[in-house]
Image (spheres, coloured by chain):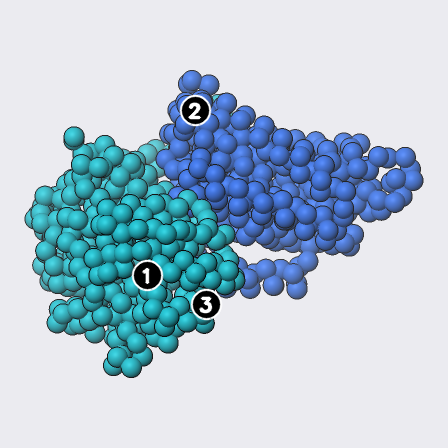
Amino acid sequence: MRIRLAALLVGTALTFGMTFAAMAQDKVTDKNVKIGVLTDLSSLYADLGGEGSVVAAEMAADDSGLKAKGWKIDVISADHQNKPDVGAGIARRWIDTDKVDIIADVPNSGVALAVNNIVKEKNSILLDSGAGSSELTNTQCTPNTVHFTYDTYMLAQSTGGAMVKAGGDTWFFITADYAFGHALENDTTAVVKANGGKVLGSVKAPLNTADFSSYLLQAQASKAKVIGLANAGGDTTNSIKQAAEFGIVKGGQKLAGLLMFLSDVHSLGLNVAQGLNLSETFYWDANDQTRAFSKRFSERLKTHAMPTMVHAGVYAGLLHYFKALEALGGNPHDGAKVVAKMKEMPTDDPLFGKGVIRIDGRAIHPAFLFEVKAPAESKGPWDLYKLVGTTPGDQAFRPLSESKCSLVKH
Amino acid sequence: MAALTDNTVRTTSRRIIGDEMIVFILMTAVLAIVPMTGIYPYFVMQGLCFALLACAFNLLLGYGGLLSFGHAMFLGTAGYVCAHALKVWGFPPELGIVAGVVAAALLSIVTGVVAIRRQGIYFAMITLALAQLLYFIYLQTPFTHGEDGIQGVPQGKMFGVLDLSHPDTLYYVVLGGFLFGFLAIYRAINSPFGEVLKAIRENEQRAISLGYKTDQYKLLAYILSGTLAGLAGSLKVLVAQNASLTDVHWTMSGEIVLMTLVGGLGTVFGPVAGAFAIIAMQQYLAGFGQWVTVIQGVIFVVCVLTFRRGVVGEIAHYFKRSL
C-alpha cells in the first residue's frame, strides 16, 4: 500500500492529463473505425479462418462504400494461437490501447467465450464467425456479441433433420469422447428422433485417435444408413480417410460430418471425401453473387483458395456493421449501442441473403445440406458440393422460446 | 546435466547475497511502478504469473536436478479449482486462491510419491504421463466445461475491501503473490535444505552415503514446487478470468521448460526474465501470424547454441556474479 501511495505521488500530472484526454475522446462520435481480426493464423483453423478472414474484413471495408464518404477504416489482425489467455490478452489490449471498435472472426470456442466476456466488460463488440459454441448466444449471451455464421445447434439441426428427410432414417454415431462430442451427438440424436428417424447405436472414440478401424467396423456392422461423425479437426479427417479405405460409402452407407468446412473437404480430396454429407450456411458456387465475391476473394488471397462460410460470415457481418454505423451517422464508439442498431436493422447481403440478427445476438439465415461430389462430377479443384437440402433460418437455429439468454424475455 | 544446471559462481556467500539483494530490490522497484509507466498492466500480470511458475519449476530442475515435464498439471489444477470455487461456490478471492493452492499441494503429494522414485528421463516421462492422465480427466469432467473452459470468473473483493476488478488493485495483489512465492523459493534455496538439494543434484549416491534421506528431500522440493506452481495458477485465474485446457496441456509444460532455459537454469532471476520474454513474444508478435512459432523456435535454437546458460546465466557468468 505504501509503495503504491509513493508511486502515485511520483505519477506526473501529464499522465493524468493524457488519460483524461483519451477518456474524453471516447465519447465523441466520429468517422474512424478500427477492426481487429482475431483468428488462428498458424494452426488447425488457419485454413477455415486465418489469413482469409483478414482478407474478408479488408474487402468488407472496401465494399462498404464508407471510405469514399470520408470514413477512415483500419483493419489489424493477430494470431490467438488457440489459447484463451493469449486471445483474451490481445482483445483487452486492442480495446484498451489500440482503440479497436470491433473484434471479428475468433474461431475456437474457448477463445471466443473469453473474448465474449471482455467485450461485455469493456462495451466493445465481438462479431464471431469462426467459433461453433451455441453458448455464445445462449447462457453466455451479451448485448455486445453477434454470432454470425453457424453454431453447433444449427449443424445438428441441418445435418440431422435434412438427412432424415432425404431418407437417411437410421443412424450410428462415432463420437469424440468429451463434452463437445457428446453435445453434438445428443443434439443430433434429438433432431433425428424428432424427424422420425432412429439411432441404432453409438461408440465413443478418445480424442486424437489414430486408428478408427474398430469403430468403423462397428458402424458398418450396425447397418445404419447414416454414420454420424460427432468429432472435429484431425479426428474427423482421420475417420473419413479410414472410412474410405473400408469402402463404407461405396457399400451404401452415408457418412455425415457434423463439423466440417470447405477447406477440410478440399484438403481431403474428392477421392476420399466423396459421398460425405455436411452442413454449411454458405457455398461459393451457390449463385452469381457468391461466385463474383469468391472470385475477387481468391484473387486477393495468397493461396487462391475459395472462401469458406467463416470467411463469408466475417465479410457479411462487417458489411452489416458498417450499415449500422452509417445509419447512426458516425461511429459512437459504444459497442452496445451499435449492436442494438445491428439487431434493429434486417440483414441483407450478397452472400447470405436476407436475414435478421435476433435479440440474443444470433444471426439468422438458411442452412444447407451438401453432399461431396464424386471425382467424375467435379469440374474443377473447388467444385466440391452438390446441394441436398435446405433448412429455413427459423428452423435451423435454436428458437428463442428454448433460449436461456438473459436478454430474451419469456 | 551438472554442467548445464550449474550456474552458480563460486564466490563468498556474503557477496552472493549482496548481489542478489540489489537485483531483487531493483526488480521489485521496477515492478512496483509499472502501473504509473503506461506499460500495459495485464501483460505484466500475466508475465508475473508465468514468472512465478517458471521459478517454481526452476526450484525443481535448477536446484534439485529433477526435470518435470508435467508442471502444467499444477498450474491447471489450481486454475480449475480456483475458478470453480470463485464462480460456482461463490468463494471470495482469497479463499479461491487458497483452494487452488491446496488442490495443487495435494496433487503434488500424490504425484510426487510416485514420480520421485525415478530419475532423469524416467522422472520426466512419469510426470508427463501423470499430467496427460489429468488432461484427459479435465477434458471429460463436466465442471471444467471441456473445450469451452470455465469462463467469466468473477474477480470479487479481496478480504472484502480490495476490488480486484480495478486493474491497479489487481496488479498489486498479483505482484504480492509473486513476491511471496519468489521469496519462499529464494529462502528455500539458500537454506540448509537447499544446500542438500544441490548436493543431491550433483551426486545423489554421495548424498545418500553421507546419511541424507534423498527421497524425502526430493519429495519436499517437488511438493514445494508444485504448490507454488499452483499459486501461479490461482493468480492467473484472477488475471485472465478463465481457466481452460491450454493450462493443463503438455505444450504448457514444454513452455515452462522453455522459459526457464531461455532465462537461465539454476539462476534466481533467470526464470523471471525468461517468462517475460516468452509471454512478450506470444502477445506482441501475435500480429506476425504464423511466424510467432517460427520466431520462438529460432530464439530457442539460438539460445541453446550460443548462450547455454540462458540470458541471466550468461550475464552472471560474464560479471562473475551470482544472480
**Callout 3, which amino acid?**
Gln
Residue placed most toward the observer, B160 or A134: A134
Q: Secondary structure at mark 2?
A: loop
Q: Is residue B197 left or right of residue B81?
A: right
**Callout 2, which amino acid?**
Trp
Q: Which callout, 2 or 3, points to the residue nearer the camera?
A: 3
Q: How much space separates mark 2 and mark 3, taking CA atoms?
A: 45 Å
User: Taking B5 as reference, is A45 above or below it?
Assistant: below
Residue sitting at 16 percent across and 62 percent down? A351
Screen quadrant of the N terminus of chain B: bottom right
Image coordinates of residue B186 in percent, x first then y, are: 68, 34
Screen quadrant of the C terminus of chain B: top right
Q: Is residue A410 left or right of residue B218?
A: left
Residue A365, by quadrant, is bottom left
Residue ID for mark 1: A225
Image coordinates of residue A248 in percent, x first then y, are: 40, 68
User: Taking A98 as reference, is B86 above or below it?
Assistant: above
**Callout 1, which amino acid?**
Lys
Q: How much space separates mark 3 and mark 1, taking CA atoms?
A: 18 Å
Residue B3, by quadrant, is bottom right
Asked if marks 2 and 3 touch (Cβ < 8 Å), the reply is no
Residue ID for mark 2: B89
Residue sitting at 48 percent across and 53 percent down? A205
User: Taking B163 as reference, is B2 above or below it?
Assistant: below
Say few, some or many: other residues with alpha carbon within 10 Å of mark 1 (under 14 / 14 to 19 / 20 or more).
Answer: many
Is residue A348 visible in the rendered image? The answer is yes
Chain letter of the residue beneath label 1 in the structure image:
A
The chain whose colour is blue is B
Residue ID for mark 3: A242
Which disc is residue A346 wearing?
none
- Give the drawing colour for chain A: cyan
Say few, some or many: other residues with alpha carbon within 10 Å of mark 3 (under 14 / 14 to 19 / 20 or more).
Answer: some
